[in-house]
Amino acid sequence: MNIVLDQLLEGRSLTEEDEDYLIHHGDDCSPCFDDIKKQQVFIGFLNQKVGRRPAPSALPHAIMARLHAEIA
């Protein structure tokens, strides 16, 4: 993990395999960050590579309907 983060810190491009590794390793990587700079680089990488999708427009209505059904 740290080798891949070091590559990002140095501005080197990552292979697709390295990118996949970082994305899938994100769940349990707090021990990998031996300094805050690496954590910031990792978060920047994720923001760049893993797009945030908006919630479906029907989701709020579905949640409210389930809540009303539970209350009734």
Image (cartoon, rainbow, N blue to C red):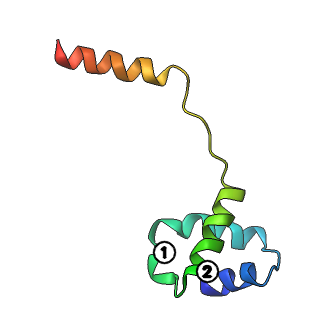
Query: Helix or strand or loop: what does disc 1 sit on?
Result: loop
- The N terminus: image quadrant: bottom right
Residue 24's x, y, as percent?
A: 56, 65
Residue 7's x, y, as percent?
A: 74, 83
- Separation (CA) of disc 1 from disc 2: 14 Å
Q: Earlier in the sequence, mark 1 or mark 2?
A: 1
**Which residue is drawn at the image coordinates 30% and 20% (left, top)?**
66
Dot 2, crowdedness within 10 Å: few (<14), some or many (≥20)? few
Q: Say which mark, if any, is on residue 68.
A: none
**Left of 22 or right of it: where is 33?**
left
Label 1 with label 2: CB-CB less than 8 Å: no
Q: Mark 2 points at which residue?
A: 37
Residue 25's x, y, as percent?
A: 54, 70
**Which residue is drawn at the image coordinates 79% and 73% (left, top)?**
15
Q: What residue type is labelled 1?
A: Cys
Dot 1, crowdedness within 10 Å: few (<14), some or many (≥20)? few
Q: Quadrant of residue 35?
A: bottom right
Q: In this view, does 6 lie above or below 47?
A: below
Q: Mark 1 points at which residue?
A: 29
**Left of 67 or right of it: where is 40?**
right
**Which residue is drawn at the image coordinates 70% and 73% (left, top)?**
18
For the residues carrying marks 1 and 2, which lies nearer the camera in this image? 2
Query: Helix or strand or loop: what does disc 2 sit on?
Result: helix
